[in-house]
Every structure is written in C-alpha cells, then in structure tokens.
Image: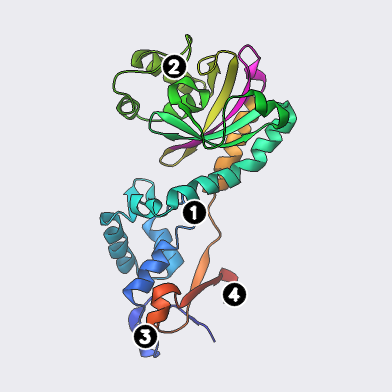
C-alpha cells in the first residue's frame, strides 16, 4: 500500500518511514519542471513535491548556483546545465510538436509555405517547413540557417530582445543577402521598433532572397522569444491578408507550451537501494484525485 509523502520529515520518521535521501529530493524537484519552458515559483515546487518549503528553497538555490536551474522574476526554470544535457533538442522537439498542427492548418488554408524557426546568435535555425509542392520553390530546409536580420522570422524574434542583446549579436557589421537587406544597426533598430508597434508582426520583402516575402510572429515565453512562425510567398504578395492566421497560430502554440500542467502528488514507496538511486527512483506520480 502506497504511503503519501509527509510534509513533516519528523512525523514520517515516527511512522517508520525513512526520510527521503538528498538524491531523491533533488529528483523530485527537477522532475517538477515537466517541460523545457516551465517556470515555477517556490510555492509551486513545494506544493508539487510535498517537501517542506525551507528544504525546497535550500535545494532550489543550490541547483541555481550549480547551473541546473535558473531563477528570474518569473520563477525557477531549467538552467544551462540541464538544457545542455540534450535539453536543447528536447526543447526544440517540444516546440516543434506544439506548432506542427498549426503549421499544417495554415498551409492548407493558404496554399503557402509555413516555417518554424528559433534564434541562434545572429542566425535563425529552421525547425520545420510545411507546404507541399510549393515548398520546393522556397530555398530553405529543416536544419538549415539564415541571417536573422534578413528574415521576417529573425526580425520577429529580435524585436523582443533588449537593445543591448541585439547589438551583442552583431559586431557592428550586418551582412546583406540582397540589395533590400538592412545594412546597419540603426536601421535594424528602427525596423524592430516598428515591429513592436505592430504588436509583433514582422514583414520581409526580398531581403533574404530577391523574389520571396514573408510575414512572421514570434512565440514569446516568460523570458523572451522562444521561436517564430512565418508564412512565405512571393515578395510582392499581399502578406497582410494572412497575418491574422500567423498571429492566431502563434498565440495557440504559446498557450499550449506555457499552460500550467495538472497538479500531481507524489507517493513515497520506501527507502532507495543503491541500484534504484543509480537509475530508478523510489517514488512515483499519481493523479491528485487518487487519495
């Protein structure tokens, strides 16, 4: 019979239940971050793990110092060390999975090519491309890259970075892909300001490839842009008519990624053996309604 984890370690000991080891407590806390973009407060983590608040805070701060988590005004989230252990691929995979239905829906509605990309330095990295036969005519590919400030995708994401964050991505020099490309930082900042005034809508007219135009919107998380969606057509096509579809898709994907997961309670099933600590924890999750 499963026993619930007591919030009071002393009361658990009185009932003959050994206290959780540090490894198990850290595992409980790390597993609270169910998605790469999850942000949780101290209260959230303590509530989900059923650990004492003081214990939770101490472990969280140690994990932040070691780089496994980070801590901002929006709460705790996975840090560079956790994301570095294949986490970036997991993060991109979660983003692609959440966006895929919307990309296909836009492609079917418009007959145009739809892109999903993330920002990587001064470049964008294409995660997905949907568009049937029309995709053949667009010189982009999944896994490929393009200059960020020359694409609607890149500009949509750059617009939501601090100005100094944009400057840091360029060494004062902006490469130009076509004669229409933005050629200096002042012009780029003016363009990004215009995108913010349009509530995030970014346009491109032959700036990356001469005959191609795009409209894009960034996917914005609590810490800034995490990706962008674009619809691609001819450079002189009326991109404004498909802009509402891109806006609605970006909003839906963001809601899917950052909606709060259902609360769970954790069940303690006894002390861990050395083999269990090496690979399998001794607790498991069960829905809150189970007890």
The one nearer the camera, 132 or 188, is 132
Query: Which numbered marker is on residue 35?
Result: 1
The one nearer the camera, 197 or 272, is 272
The one nearer the camera, 23 or 13, is 23
Span of residues in magenta? 225-243
Mark 4 or mark 3: whose residue is earlier in sequence: 3
Q: In which quarter of the image is residue 162?
A: top left
Determine whether 144 is above or below 5 in the image. Answer: above
- Which residue, given by chain and number where applicable, does mark 2 sit on? 191
Magenta stretch holds residue 213: no
Mark 4 or mark 1: whose residue is earlier in sequence: 1
Cα–Cα gap, marks 2 and 1: 33 Å
Mark 3 or mark 2: whose residue is earlier in sequence: 3
Q: Measuring 42% from the left and 27% from the top, which residue is drawn there? A: 158
Category of crowding for the residue at label 3, using alpha-carbon neighbours closer than 10 angstroms: few (below 14), some (14–19), many (at least 20): some
Determine whether 132 is above or below 28 in the image. Answer: above
Of the two numbered discs 4 and 1 in the rendering, the one whose residue sits closer to the viewer? 1
Of the two numbered discs 4 and 2 in the rendering, the one whose residue sits closer to the viewer? 2
Asked whether disc 4 touches disc 3, contact meaning CB atoms under 8 Å apart, the reply is no
SS type, badge 4: helix
């Amino acid at each position: 019979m499963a026993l619930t984890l007591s919030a009071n370690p002393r009361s658990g000991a009185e009932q003959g239940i050994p206290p959780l080891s540090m490894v198990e407590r850290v595992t409980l806390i790390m597993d609270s971050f169910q998605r790469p973009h999850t942000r949780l407060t101290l209260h959230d983590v303590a509530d989900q793990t059923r650990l004492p608040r003081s214990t939770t805070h101490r472990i969280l701060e140690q994990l932040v110092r070691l780089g496994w988590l980070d801590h901002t005004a929006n709460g705790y989230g996975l840090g560079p060390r956790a994301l570095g252990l294949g986490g970036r691929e997991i993060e991109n995979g979660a983003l692609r999975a959440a966006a895929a239905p919307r990309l296909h829906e836009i492609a079917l509605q418009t007959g145009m090519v739809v892109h999903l990309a993330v920002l990587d330095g001064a470049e964008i990295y294409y995660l997905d491309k949907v568009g049937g036969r029309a995709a053949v005519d667009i010189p982009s590919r999944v896994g490929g890259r393009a200059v960020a400030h020359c694409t609607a995708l890149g500009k949509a994401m750059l617009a939501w970075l601090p100005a100094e964050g944009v400057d840091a991505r360029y060494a004062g020099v902006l490469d130009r892909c076509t004669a229409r490309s933005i050629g200096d930082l002042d012009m780029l900042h003016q363009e990004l300001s215009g995108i913010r005034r349009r509530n995030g809508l970014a346009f491109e007219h032959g700036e990356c490839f001469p005959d191609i135009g795009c409209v894009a919107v960034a996917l914005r998380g609590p810490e800034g842009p995490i990706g962008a969606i674009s619809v691609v057509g001819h450079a002189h096509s009326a991109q404004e008519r498909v802009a509402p579809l891109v806006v609605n898709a970006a909003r839906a994907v963001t809601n899917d990624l950052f909606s709060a997961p259902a609360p769970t309670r954790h069940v303690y099933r006894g002390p861990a053996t050395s083999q269990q600590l090496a690979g399998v924890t001794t607790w498991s999750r069960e829905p809150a309604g189970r007890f």
